[in-house]
Image (cartoon, rainbow, N blue to C red):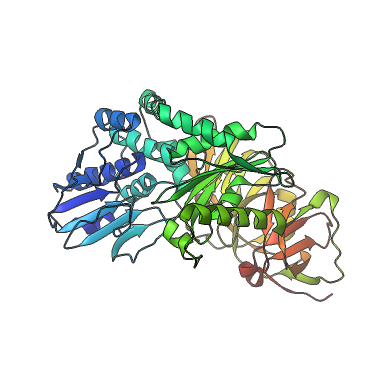
Amino acid sequence: MRLNELTKYNDIVIQCHDNPDADALSSGYALYWYLTKQGKTPRFIYRGHNRISKNNLIIMLEKLAVPISYEPDFDETPELLITVDCQYGQKNVTCSKAQNIAIIDHHQSTVELPALSEVRSNIGSCATVMWDMLREEGISVDDDILLSTALYYGLYTDTNKLSEVSHPLDRDMRDSLVINKSLVTEMSNSNISLNELKITGKAIFDYEYNVDNKCIVIKADQCDPTILGVISDFTLETVGVDVCLAYYVSPQEIKFSVRSCVKEVHANELAAFLATGIGGGGGHLTKAGGAIRPEKLANLYEDDSDMESIVRAELGKRLDQYFSMYRIIYAKETTLDTTDMKIYKKIPQQLGCARLTDLFPLNTMVEIRTLEGDINVRIEEDKYLMIGIAGEVYPIAKEKLESSYNYVDEPYDKTFEYKPCIKDVLTGEKKNVLSYAKSVVSTGDVRIYAKTLDDYVKLFTAWDEEKYYSGCPGDYIAVREDDPHDIYIINGQLFDKLYKEADA
């Protein structure tokens, strides 16, 4: 859905979920701001039994001029009702009548969506969704520091002080917004009540510890999600604790926070695993979090157990599965047995490559932003970037590039979900990698041994001993014929597009 599709309506009401948080307030604020600029006179409301009372949100409403009103008894039937940061029909938003419904959200879909909907469940905040939709209309919020600060604070709070940011669009918004930093600090330092301070202390005394996995699980009472991060960060400093999961259960959602201090467990991967099929999770390698929808979780259990018991059982089961299912391989120390592996060679296919010195001067420290994450490298004379078939980006040495690929006289014009970009860390200058890419095809000279995986693997490659690459049944594990330690994982859905069997 595009925002301009909403402008054909005149009587428009924007509604966020009951007990709104900063993300709901900021995304509704952005939509109100857009519609007003289009000559409309929208209203922004919230309903439910409780008026906003948290100090940080009261500061946000007053100092950022958020144009929302509390309408618990709203009984009108507008021409268009737009729910933001929630979905019409969910339990966390009081139902209001309307002639037409639209939805803008970033949570997992749990209801049938109307034609007018934009739900991106892989994004960290609804504020980011709104910011990107405004960009699609060619509109910048840079000249409105109040709205910019609100959007930033919406992302800040919904991703636990940015520690659980995972999608590059979230990082793009975070980096580009011009904000009132002192006000963000003021709101952040007004976030925890004395009662929530008690919740923190009480939760830490009630924990479950798995000595084999060095994993601790802590259940807290319902609180601001930031509290979960405080609990997790504090607990991770305990001797013998490598991984921490803190969570709370509410009627609307189950929020959780994950922390890891060992390279063998990526917090973002564990968070995504815990929420698979029932919610969403993500973040960084060491800090992550997510949310689970109670209605989706309840569908997995046929008995009448209470929700807290179901959550405890399901999280415990998934943690056990996660820790027991992976085989860990350190490529530098491993030589694969290739007797049961077939030999393959690359299928000539147009890929992209960019010479890093074409983008920035030699020795510049740059950050390369991709869908998979950020990569920090220093510009070197012989260093290039490869752009894979699915838009993945990875550094490659000139020698390996020229021995494996040939340049072709064709423009590189691929499109992907997210366009990788590169930024000078010192100056902040950004450039689009695809604009500098040239087309290459593989020579077919590189041969690999490969076979399908029948288990789950975490692979630390020879060129990166700090970050592993995950493989699951159906993916391929491969090793170059000319380098026994150049071991890597190939996505099972891409393998047949990239390789074909070669003569032994």
Above or below residue 339? Residue 243 is above
Is there any visible trace of residue 200 in the rendered image?
Answer: yes
Is there any visible trace of residue 161 in the rendered image?
Answer: no
Q: Quadrant of residue 317?
A: bottom right
Task: Give the residue displayed 55% in from the left and 63% down from the top.
Answer: 410
Q: As drawn, is 58 to the left or to the right of 250?
A: left
Q: Residue 281, percent across and down? A: 51, 51
Above or below residue 16? Residue 361 is above
Above or below residue 370? Residue 347 is below
Q: Residue 212, percent across and down? A: 74, 47
Q: As drawn, is 289 to the left or to the right of 17?
A: right
In front: 212, or 482?
212
Q: Residue 422, percent across and down? A: 53, 43
In front: 500, or 339?
339
The N terminus sits in image quarter: bottom left
The C terminus sits in image quarter: bottom right
Q: As drawn, is 149 to the left or to the right of 388?
A: left
Q: How many marks?
A: 0
Q: Residue 7, percent across and down? A: 19, 55
